[in-house]
Image (tube, rainbow, N blue to C red):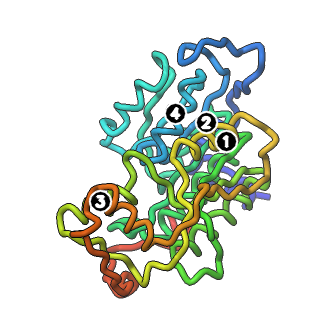
Amino acid sequence: GKERVVAMQAHVTRASVREVARQSKRHISSPAMRVEGGRSSVAGLTATVFGCTGFLGRYVVNKLGRVGTTVVVPHRIHDEDNVRHLKLMGDLGMINAIPFHARDLDSIAAAVEKSDVVINLLGKQMRTRKFDYIGSNVEAVTNIAKVCKEVGVPKFVHVSAVAASEDSPSEWLRCKAMGETQVRNYYPDATILRANVIYGEEDNFLNLMAKWTKIFGAIPIMGNGDNMLQPVYVDDVAECVRAAAFEGVHAGKTYELNGPEKMSLYKHAQWVQEQIWRKESGRIRCVPDMSAYLPVAGGSPPIGGGG
């Protein structure tokens, strides 16, 4: 009746960009569109990589760019300089930057409207002034998956964390599990990659331990350091993301990405100090986890509470 017409008009007005994108022609990759030749090749695939400016993001963009993928690299508004280094990872015109905000659904739609696959790498392990754990790991993921479904993106790849569980004592891991659930709600055939601690040349894991040792002479560790880790190399994780984007056999599956060696956090700290020649002078200090008692400015509104 009349109420239904009004509701439809309100929806079209609110989601005008998404409605237009849904009607537009989508170019799905096909063998006829592929031209081989490294970074100058044409894979016939367009991928949007959220979180492209992060540690893992640059490796994922490089993996896609080196096989001729057209890559959309969303960045924070007014932070276009943060994606300049990504331009070199593909041929001319293949790496395209576009501003977006995780709570602006129309800006998300503009970033994914021409994509054959969307890769989500967003997810903070710390609270910020505008995004707490729920904001960055659940709300942002929900908005991206929802908009992708509305505009008709056929494939979704989501990077999560090993041990993500809604029953976990860790708030961050609970939020990662909630994010996975939201992805599955919109994309039952999504590929979810649960990565262990990721290390590499620019990581904030081993490098941070080395920096603390050199500056302060000690590495602070939350708890007693007996939690076991299997760090995985960043390039290996990026290759898994590339495979999930290109190969259909991974649809609907969840993978846990672990490194070859299992070692406690305390042992990792000892190993770092040995590698930087601080085995004798360096110290490891176990401290209680007080993060739950720290004040947090701002916070995230409930999911669906407005953008």
Q: Crowding at label 2, few (<14), some or many (≥20) Cα neighbours within 10 Å?
A: many
Residue at label 1? Answer: 151
User: Label 3 vs label 2: CA separation?
Assistant: 43 Å
Q: Secondary structure at mark 2?
A: loop
Marks 3 and 1 close (CB-CB < 8 Å): no
Does label 4 or label 1 sit earlier along the sequence?
Answer: 4
> Which three-letter amino acid code belongs to the residue tagged 3?
Ala
Residue 185 vs residue 261: left or right?
Answer: right
The quadrant of the rendering that contains the N terminus is: bottom right
Does label 3 or label 1 sit earlier along the sequence?
Answer: 1
Q: Residue furthest front?
A: 280
Q: Secondary structure at mark 4?
A: strand
Q: Crowding at label 4, few (<14), some or many (≥20) Cα neighbours within 10 Å?
A: many
Marks 1 and 2 close (CB-CB < 8 Å): yes
User: Label 2 vs label 4: CA separation?
Assistant: 10 Å
Residue at label 4? Answer: 72
Residue at label 3? Answer: 210
Marks 3 and 2 close (CB-CB < 8 Å): no
Q: Crowding at label 1, few (<14), some or many (≥20) Cα neighbours within 10 Å?
A: many
Q: Nearer the viewer, residue 105 or 126?
A: 126
> What x and y, as percent, mark residue 34?
70, 15
